[in-house]
């Protein structure tokens, strides 16, 4: 019998927002009351770290502890020039320097976010996650980080600034929060905290323009909303925990069971992204090996990553905005010749209507997806579109 992986109604925006908030409250308990500015400062100072690769430096925030291992969320561009095995460090609130495991840096797909890790016998607090969906324009927020040395401030110094959210949207590389806090280079990767001291985003960019070849800041900044990690981070942490092939003591059944759990999360996360009808956002999320990706259509045509995104964009543009989808996947076959390769055949079913509960049509098709674990991360390398059922 086919194994039902997920069945989600698309779109049900309000239900998904409530589900996202519930997930946050279950994964990270949070404080519901406001804090004074000094209390937020104390929270920020405890969880904000200096991220110091060889090329430059940036900021980050402690988000998870597993035994003596700590995970730090930062902006991808802070750490992405660091090569595996190269020296880099995190400096915590007690001024202790901790070597970063540069073999295990994980860059989250499609967004300017990265997870790094270090080990320490000391105990450090981790940030409490808030709900960035509930944040809105004029809300007070705080940005913390370590600005690069300048003419007057000659050493990295913890800095926190107060401002307000001025806008929300969907921009490249996962950016979605706009705010007017004063920021400086080096604060990229630092936390965005709400008035309760909860982490609602990661600071990353300063809005501006170039005047006669010189970058001039416009007074606004952009951050990645923390709700972005609802889909990405659980998978990321799972892969962090086991970044290489399982040892020989792990049975093939256990390996397949772990991969099936990964697929459960993957399929469940796709439905709310399809609901946006935004092909670029969907494909940025999908864990695809963009250089190797090939999509074979039923007609025999082969598309690369860019052609597939363009084709999906044209398809979504033809769908009436009033059309409601119900999306589900059934795995019909899973083959794992070794722990780093898998071939999955699934049936994708889309039921659509103009009114909830009033079915107008059903489309079912088969696809075969080839997965490969590359540098510890499962990536899609090819998809073959099968017949419609």
Image: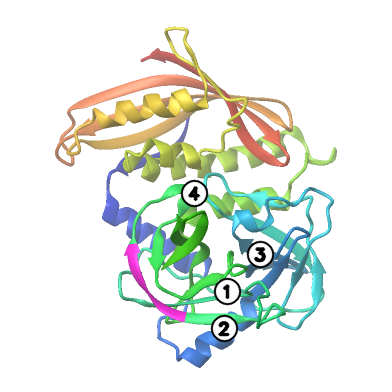
Looking at the image, residue 114 lies above or below residue 162: above
Q: Callout 1: 10 Å neighbours few (<14), some, many (20+)?
A: many
Between circles 1 and 4, the one closer to the viewer is 4
Q: Which residue is mark 2?
A: 43
Q: CA distance from mark 1 to mark 2?
A: 8 Å
Q: Which residue is at a point 48% across and 55% down the rendered structure image?
A: 212
Overall secondary structure of the magenta section: strand
Q: Earlier in the sequence, mark 1 or mark 3?
A: 3
Task: Give how far apart the Cα atoms at labels 4 and 2 are.
Answer: 27 Å
| Label total for image | 4
> What residue did someone put label 3 on?
72
User: Which sits earlier in the primary sequence, circle 2 or circle 3?
Assistant: 2
> In the picture shown, does residue 348 fall above or below 157?
above
Asked whether disc 1 touches disc 3, contact meaning CB atoms under 8 Å apart, the reply is no
Mark 2: which secondary structure?
A: helix
Mark 1 touches mark 2? (CB < 8 Å) = yes
The residue beneath circle 4 is 173
- The answer to whether residue 224 of the structure is visible from this angle is no
Q: Earlier in the sequence, mark 4 or mark 2?
A: 2
- Label 2 close to label 3 by CB (< 8 Å): no
User: Does residue 103 appear in the picture of this structure?
Assistant: yes
User: Mark 4: few, some, or many residues within 10 Å (few <14, many ≥20)?
Assistant: some
Q: Tell me the CA gap for discs 1 and 4.
A: 23 Å
Q: Nearer the viewer, mark 4 or mark 3?
A: 4
**First in residue order: circle 4 vs circle 3:** 3
Pointer 1: what residue? 127
């Amino acid at each position: 019998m086919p194994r039902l992986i997920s069945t989600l109604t698309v779109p049900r925006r309000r239900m998904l927002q409530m589900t996202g908030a519930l997930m946050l409250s279950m994964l990270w308990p949070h404080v519901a009351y406001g804090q004074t500015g000094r209390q937020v400062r104390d929270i920020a100072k405890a969880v904000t770290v200096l991220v110091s690769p060889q090329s430059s430096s940036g900021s980050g925030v402690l988000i998870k502890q597993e035994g003596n291992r700590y995970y730090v969320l930062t902006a991808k561009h802070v750490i992405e020039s660091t090569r595996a095995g190269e020296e880099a460090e995190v400096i915590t609130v007690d001024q202790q320097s901790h070597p970063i495991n540069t073999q295990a840096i994980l860059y989250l797909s499609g967004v300017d976010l990265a997870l790094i890790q270090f080990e320490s016998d000391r105990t450090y607090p981790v940030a409490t996650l808030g709900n960035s969906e509930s944040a809105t324009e004029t809300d007070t927020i705080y940005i913390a980080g370590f600005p690069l040395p300048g003419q007057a401030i000659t050493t990295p110094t913890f800095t926190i600034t107060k401002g307000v959210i001025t806008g929300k949207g969907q921009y490249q590389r996962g950016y979605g929060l706009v705010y007017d806090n004063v920021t400086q280079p080096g604060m990229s990767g630092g936390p965005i905290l709400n008035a309760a001291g909860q982490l609602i985003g990661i600071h990353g960019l300063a809005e501006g323009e170039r005047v006669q070849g010189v970058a001039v800041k416009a007074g606004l900044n952009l951050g990645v909303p923390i709700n972005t990690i609802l889909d990405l981070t659980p998978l990321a942490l799972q892969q962090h925990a086991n970044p290489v092939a399982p040892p020989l003591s792990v049975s093939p059944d256990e390996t397949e069971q772990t991969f099936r759990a990964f697929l459960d999360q993957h399929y469940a996360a796709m439905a709310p992204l399809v609901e946006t009808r935004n092909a670029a956002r969907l494909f940025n999320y999908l864990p695809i090996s963009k250089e190797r990706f090939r999509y074979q259509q039923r007609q025999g045509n082969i598309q690369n990553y860019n052609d597939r995104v363009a084709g999906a964009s044209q398809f979504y543009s033809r769908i009436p905005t009033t059309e409601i989808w119900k999306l589900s996947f059934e795995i019909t076959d899973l083959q794992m010749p070794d722990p780093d390769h898998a071939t999955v055949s699934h049936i994708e079913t889309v039921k659509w209507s103009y009114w909830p509960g009033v079915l107008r049509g059903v489309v079912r098709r088969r696809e075969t997806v080839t997965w490969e674990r590359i540098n510890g991360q499962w990536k899609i390398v090819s998809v073959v579109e099968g017949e419609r059922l």
